[in-house]
Image (cartoon, grey):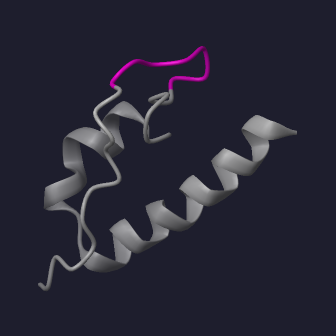
Amino acid sequence: MNKDIITPCIGICSYNADGLCVGCLRTGDEIVNWFDMSDEERRSVMLQLDQRAQSSFD
């Protein structure tokens, strides 16, 4: 396993009403399991983060 994808954490750790971290937009489970995820799982989450960010501005 490569672990090329680093954490999207920016050190602002607080959850919004949707249960997403306001800093990185990950769920609590995604944060806790981040370093145990495969590269493919983390890549998938990273793609979801872009979608979550777009939704927060709609």
In this picture, residue 46 sits left or right of residue 33: right
What x and y, as percent, mark residue 47? 56, 67
Identity of the residue drawn at 35% across and 67% down: 42
For this orientation, the residue located farthest to the top is 17
Q: If the image is split into quadrants, where does the N terminus sit?
A: bottom left
For this orientation, the residue located farthest to the bottom is 2
Identity of the residue drawn at 27% across and 77% down: 39
What x and y, as percent, mark residue 2? 14, 85
In front of the other: 4 or 27 = 4
Query: What are the residue bounds of the magenta stretch?
Result: 13-19
Q: How many marks?
A: 0
Picture layout, residue 22 above or below residue 14:
below
In front of the other: 55 or 1 = 55
Picture layout, residue 56 above or below residue 6:
above
Q: If the image is split into quadrants, where does the C terminus sit?
A: top right
Identity of the residue drawn at 27% across and 73% down: 5
What x and y, as percent, mark residue 16? 55, 18
Picture layout, residue 36 above or below residue 16:
below
Picture layout, residue 30 above or below residue 18:
below
For this orientation, the residue located farthest to the right is 58
What x and y, as percent, mark residue 28? 35, 32
Picture quadrant of residue 41 = bottom left
Task: Give the overall secondary structure of the magenta segment.
Answer: loop
Residue 3 among those drawn in magenta: no
Residue 14 among those drawn in magenta: yes
Picture quadrant of residue 11 = top left
Identity of the residue drawn at 47% across and 69% down: 44
